[in-house]
Amino acid sequence: MTQPLLTRLTRDLPKLMKAYRERHWAELAQSWLAGTPLVAQNHLEATPDAPAASGLWAGTTVGALLRWAISLTPQQDADSATLLRCFYVDGMTVEAVSERLAISPAAFHKVRQPKAVTALAQALAPLLSQQLVRHPALLAQVIEDRYANLSPPAQRLARFVALFRVAVPAHWVQQALGLLPDEASHLVAAVAGWGLIHATQQLGQPALMAPPEAQAYWLQHLHPPEAQAWHRVAFEYFKQQQHSIEAAHHQLALGAPEFAAQWLITHQTQLLGSNQAQPLLKLIDRIQPQLLQGETWAALKLIEGKAAQALGNANLALEAYRTALASPGQPHHKAEACYRCANALEAQDIDGALTHYQRSIELFRAAAPQDLLHVRAYIDLVWLWLQARLDLPQADSALHDAEALVHRHHAQDLSLKADLHNARARWCHLNGDAALGITHRQQALLAATESGLQERVMKLAHNLGQDYRDAGQYELAMRYLEQSLGLAQTLGNRLLEGVNHETIGGCFFFQHNLPAAIQRYRQAHALFVASGYRDQQGWAAFDLCEAYLQLGELAPAQQAYREAEQLAQQLGLARLSQALAELPMAQRSVSLPEMKLLQRRAQLIELAQQDGSVSNRVYRARVGISQKQAARDLALWVREGTLVVVGQGRSVVYRLATTI
């Protein structure tokens, strides 16, 4: 007896005993024990009356392995042990086996007793130590053997319930099979007793479901006329229940792939909006393209791509969209496929995304100019020009085209108006017109509020808060940021909840209320850590480091610096690394590079001499640094006596203290 085998038996037998008690016969039939030569060679033929060739009672041996242990008597050798429980296929009780073997039921011992496990392992070691074999027919034979013990009406019930992949109400099964209530209860108890169906609950009502193994078996073995009739019944039931996945599944089983595909296409909005992306992908995978019309296949691949994107599988989504783009079909399907390709490409190929957006716009213009996605393609293209390329003329051109489309075809669509104003606001800020940007952001927020789209309101309120923060209007900024924060908490959006805390912290930072800033930064940091947003965690750590440095608390500043530095390296966050490099970390002997500081000082002096004074906004725009870095520079030169502060609030400017 080898120690690994004993260890394996000791580990697995309690699990298999539990499976036996809970009637999980399929788990038993597919266990490693059922793959041993003991079962493969002897199980089905051997009975307690006919010793197997090995000299062991095959049926009772496996039964003992799966539930009860043996008790070796002094008069018997280990290789002819009295094995005390028949295998589940035999369907015999402990008492019946005891009677046929002429032994006492009192000799039974539970497998979990260590001595019993050891004795059993020693008795069976010669067989169990041999190479495992696969016995693919065993599972089917187990089902057939259990099924044979049922009456014809009970067999019919077992077949019918096995047709369904999900639980169905017991009262509906009774009605569908034309059974009386008492008759149905009796049959359900009989079939459940053999483990061929499970009684469960559905919305507080009794429901029935067959084990997956029984479902798979009857999918292959139902008589075609009966299967056809029952699949039609199932389709009508799921159609009434608005369970589109199962309705399409039964149409597919009826040999109607075109109907099934059209059903999915018709109900795609419901399916994609109800967390059914995974079962949807599995169902689409069963549909063969040669059985569908070309335009149906293209539309189905579009749905597959959307489902894949919902699951974060960008490669599968791209493959599906490209298939749709290459398939014969309606022109608007090609336009949408091109648009979806562009959307999926944004994260990995900016040039490819730009090309696909532009081509999709051409296709929409020719095939369906009024399609909402036509406008969406323009808006997404605008953001790509703004964020990835900083090409303001191209973005402006695309925005004008989008605005004209909305005016022509979607004048009443508030969500589109909100998105257009939001994009235009960003363009204005990048173009140096912050006041006009705020005006557009206000219009975007108003349109989103009128439309009742809380997600958009949440995001736009945050954006508007950022705008006011950058403009130095901190009271207004925090009003909108708190509005966005409240919505984020209501909607359960942990990312925006953290981002709002972080932005509010920035407002306090610029007002030199460092304790309040640190409190908000810490709240943001905790949310990002708990939710797994590691890039945002890095930026929150950076903010904490900066605030602690301003307070002169070097120990927590150093700790936050190390965290941000580590995350920047791990995640490849180049902007964060650059921002960290500019922090004056004296305790790490890290200072602002003297050359860069002197260059910025020279630029500031030139600006101040040329214009008479300089603001934070003008200085950072000319030098190309962040708002916070500009504030640090200006504060440093005020302390050094190079600059003096003139004015208050938004009108603050800096002038040279002396002629240099």
Image (cartoon, rainbow, N blue to C red):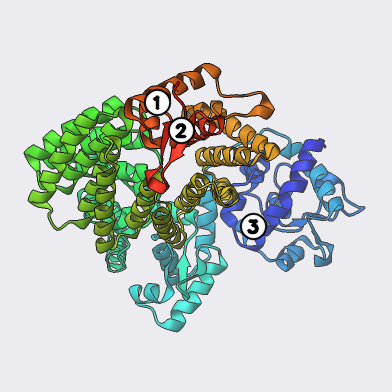
The 10 Å Cα crowd at callout 2, few under 14, some 14 to 19, many 20 or more, is many
The 10 Å Cα crowd at callout 3, few under 14, some 14 to 19, many 20 or more, is some
Q: Which mark is residue 623?
A: 1
477 sits left or right of 42 in the view: left
Query: In percent of the image, x 42 and y 32: which residue is there?
Result: 655
Pick the residue in front: 258 or 219.
258
The three-letter code of the residue at mark 1 reads: Val
Mark 1 / mark 2, whichever is N-terminal: 1
Q: CA distance from mark 1 to mark 3?
A: 71 Å
74 sits left or right of 251 in the view: right
User: Pointer 1 and pointer 2: residues touching (CB < 8 Å)?
Assistant: yes
| Residue 176 visible in the snapshot | yes
Furthest residue in direction right, as rendered: 74
Q: Quadrant of residue 296?
A: top left
Mark 1 / mark 3, whichever is N-terminal: 3
Q: Label 3 belongs to which residue?
A: 19
Query: In percent of the image, x 57 and y 38: which residue is there?
Result: 546
Q: Label 2 belongs to which residue?
A: 630
Q: Identify the element where label 1 is drawn.
A: helix
